[in-house]
Image (spheres, helix red, strand yellow):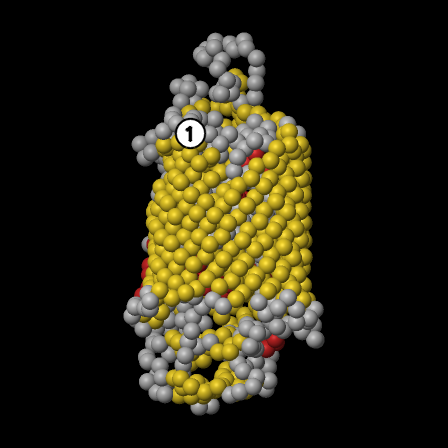
Amino acid sequence: MSKAAFVFVFVLFWISFSSLAQLAKVKGTLLDAQNRPLSNVNISFLGHTTQSNAKGFYAIKVPVNKKINLVFSHLSFKKSTVSLLLKNSEDYELNLVMNEHEEQMGEIIITKDKKSQIQGITTITPDVIKKTPGANAGIENVLKTLAGVNSNNELSTQYSVRGGNYDENLVYVNEIEVYRPFLIRSGQQEGLSFTNTDLVQNVNFSAGGFQAKYGDKLSSVLDITYRNPTQFAAAFEASFLGGSLAVDAVSKNKKWTAVTGVRYRNNSLLVNSQDTETNYTPSFVDVQTNVNYQASAKWQWSFLGNISQNKYDYEPLLRKTKFGTADKPMLLTVFYDGQEKDKYQTYFAALKTTFKASDRLIFKFIGSVYHTLEQEHFDILAQYRLGENDTTIGTETYDDVSYTSGIGTQLNHARNDLDALILNSEVKGFYDWAKSNLEFGVKYTRESIRDRIMEWEVVDSAGFSINPPIINFAQKDEPYTSFTGPLAPYQSVFATNFNTINRFSAFVQWNAKSNLENAQLWYTAGVRMQNWGVSGTNAPANSQTVFSPRAQLALKPNWEKEMIFRISGGYYYQPPFYRELRDASGAVQPNVKAQQSVQVVLGNEYSFQMWKRPFKLVSELYYKSLTDVNNYTIDNVRIRYAANNDAKAYAQGLDFRLNGEFVPGTESWFSFGYLKTEENSNNKGYIARPTDQRLKFGVLFQDYMPNIPSMKLYLNLVYNTGLPGGSPSYSDPYVYQNRLNDYRRVDIGFSKILIDAASTKVRKNWLGNFKELSIGLEIFNLFNNQNAITNTWVRDVYSKNEYAIPNYMTTRIFNVKLNAKL
């Protein structure tokens, strides 16, 4: 039996065996009147006790089919007693607010926060994010399992949503918009996402139809909140891919709190599994902190800071890629000389203060600065040999080229440098009255960009320089007739741009709740405005203004079945950022308009019980009509825009997600998405856009052994149909339409919990210093699928055919991980 088959059988056995788990458990979170987690609360019944951890979480096993009184006690709070009766294999969630003044007693009463359901927001818990295996573990790794969110690159943290590209997604941390580097062209250069998972408290995600209070992008919003700790704690993680350390600190008077994280990542384990042999010495490091100060009952201050440095030193040596068919196997062998030295340094700082003018009126003042210094320098000479692969065992040329059909040389050169400074200043307000509230805000942004692009490519085949395909030379029969015209690089871009963009934006939004007969009704209406002007190199000062009205409506009928119906949408504009202003030649086009999208999203959320456990089915139908579209091409993760607004497009689709406790005490989900997006450039007709990801299946599954509950399993599965792409960068998409192969990937993780935070066992040895301790094994790309991100095009000089050589992603990789909390 092969290794893959063995692992597959083992996984199936695990899942089948674990499904027999029969447990009765009570779990939940304990809070004080200010909704702060309560630690060290004693939970007891009939002599059995446990305590809540630093996050206020607790879990305790209870007898089934027997009424018991669960007692919650703490020195600073009144005792609470809850009577409950659980059935066999039931896993019950009980969340309590401990009262300082009066004792609580009664049967279980559980209320759910409907805010996320009403707004159509997906909420992801930090615990799920930390435990989900993936080559790029983190928030983005979990997002890629959701319907409507797509990525065919496990080395990248970037994602597309419902037909949009990587530049169309908003990301906020503590209400502050964050950015990513500009010059990244491949996933292996990225290193670390801005968001530090160790510091996260809440994660909310909207895939479309979001509210006016969020910014001016076309596709999605990722809204992240870092935690405000209540006591000292520390968390540590180490693996073959790097490590991290996070520390929670609280002052004696509880007015000062801070969470600080340090991360280091090394992608060598992943990059060395690809076809190309390399000397690869990356260094991805960042330090991030969030400091909070409660000055008084009315004033609260916070500081968010981040310093990161990504050094990418890459020296390719040899590449061997097999492709073709069983009848005609082909092999490309490439010998390299030269290296690539890239460096990305980013500095981010934000100061935020919240002033509570009254119980109904709150103001927030936010200022932030983002500075990035980026360089992309490389000189790489590639000498290739293309031919038929000898698969006959025993021959001298076995697993090598037996008949050469093409040889050549390719030289790539770049000296690209970018210095960008982005300043933000914002005022936001919140006024609450009766059953409605008003949100409003004003923001100023200044973007200063200094950019130099100098890159070219020269291609030689059989000793003859190949002319650029975009230039029409009269002579076409090389090498049989000597070329006498001018020599030109195969591809080249030379430009220097110093530009400034000033933006003024504002929003106002009204939220209200009412009743429609016996049904509950929530509605939101708002409008955004943005004015921006571009000035600088080749950009005479100009100004444009757009208005973006948006609305949401949610209805919860008074039915026996718990359902919520939603409709949302409006006008969504995306004023161009610097990269969208820069065309394929590197020149800035200051008159590029904002891309416009009219969106409608219909949603339904159905909550129900299955196997006596909670489940939820979320379905959404959406349609987007886009005008003033700025066409683009994608090469790996690099986007190049046409910067001419000469197209229109549409996106339509259907998303489903079923999540719940498929295994008692764990959260898992299965998602399915259908998407079709096409564009029409200059009225030539509709063709597929680069993000036309037709079908998507995603699974996030958690499990444990019933007899050994400390043994956990985490499964992350993604299947995407092939994207349009892999065509030569100069090709006309109306003449040449190509799709990459389907993307199939399964990552799995096994974890043994050595110390559980919910355990009451006292350890007198050195292990007693830990609140949590676990060790795990992760297998990336479990079934060793060959996924291609792009194609390399190689010319056969004799037949003048061009072969598409797939650039494969990572193979099967094993990783060991250690997690600890103090």
State the residue in front, 399 or 706. 706
Eyeballing the image, is 429 above or below 679?
A: below
What is the three-letter code of the residue carrying label 1?
A: Ser
2 sits left or right of 220 in the view: left
Classify the position of the N terminus by image quarter: bottom left
Report whether residue 426 is seen.
yes
Q: Secondary structure at mark 1?
A: strand
Eyeballing the image, is 811 above or below 93?
A: above
Residue 566: % across, % down: 37, 57
Q: Residue at x 58, y 41 (%)?
A: 531
Residue 793: % across, % down: 45, 29
Eyeballing the image, is 287 above or below 516?
A: above
Report whether residue 130 is seen.
no
Residue 676: % across, % down: 35, 41
99 sits left or right of 397 in the view: right
Q: Residue at x 55, y 73 (%)?
A: 35
In which quadrant of the rendered view does residue 27 lie?
Answer: bottom left
Q: Residue at x 56, y 63 (%)?
A: 431
Residue neighbourhood size for the residue with mark 1, other residues' Cα within 10 Å, grouped as few (<14), some (14–19), many (≥20): some
State the residue in front, 360 or 705. 360
Q: Residue at x 48, y 36 (%)?
A: 634
Which residue is disc 1 drawn over? 681
73 sits left or right of 721 in the view: right
